[in-house]
Image (cartoon, rainbow, N blue to C red):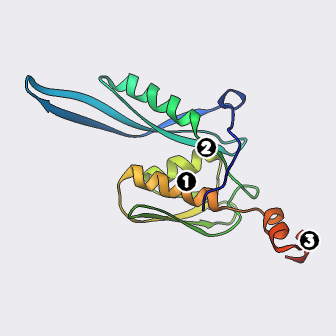
Amino acid sequence: MTTLTKKLDANQFNLKDQVVAINRVTKVVKGGKNMSFAALVVVGDAASGVVGYGSGKAKEVPQAIRKGIESAKKNLVKVNLTETTIPHQVLGRYGSGQVLLKPAPEGTGVIAGGAVRAVMTSAGVQNVLTKSIGSPNPHNVIKATFNALTQLRDRGEVASTRGKQVEEL
């Protein structure tokens, strides 16, 4: 269930980048082995609840990271938050990777592993419980997390789709 959102301008946010995974890849050719690096990067502005991910490939690690950051800035997503946590429980899926996100009370912190933690901290979520199910592949885990984040709805949205007032919910 994807929503059509207007493109967010990366220049208006104070984006911080976080490298999730760096992978050394080798292509075997007639002359030997060509080595390059693939980087998976998450960028986000915790203050405004905006986050994005991207991957980049290059001969050296810094260039791969730079390409990943540029790619991540192109697909930013606004996350619906309630104060410091998420509004409701949600299960995101991508491939065989699944990510369960649960709201948590104040003071819990981000209970998440690796790739999910990077996305949650970059998005500005301070209290959340997560469980990564299935594939441990960081690419699939991040895509499943973004799938879950795009499913989040705030009270106003739910009320309007049901044709009720916010107070009635």
Real-space CA distance between mark 1 and mark 2, rounded to the nearest whole angstrom: 9 Å
Please name which of the two marks, 2 or 3, marks the residue nearer to the observer: 3
Callout 2 secondary element: strand
| Label 3 crowd (10 A; few <14 / some 14-19 / many >=20) | few
- Label located before the other in sequence (1 or 2): 2
Give the image location of residue 118, x and y in percent. 51, 46
Left or right? Give the position of 93 relative to 109: left
Which quadrant, please, contains the N terminus? bottom right
| Label 1 crowd (10 A; few <14 / some 14-19 / many >=20) | many
Look at the numbered discs 1 and 2 and tell me whether their residues touch, using CB distance below 8 Å: yes
Q: Amino acid at mark 2?
A: Val
Find residue 51 and name its label: 2
From this view, report whether residue 73 is shown above or below residue 120. above
Callout 3 secondary element: loop
Which quadrant, please, contains the C terminus? bottom right
Q: Residue at x 69, y 46 (%)?
A: 49
- Label located before the other in sequence (2 or 3): 2
Residue occupied by mark 1: 146
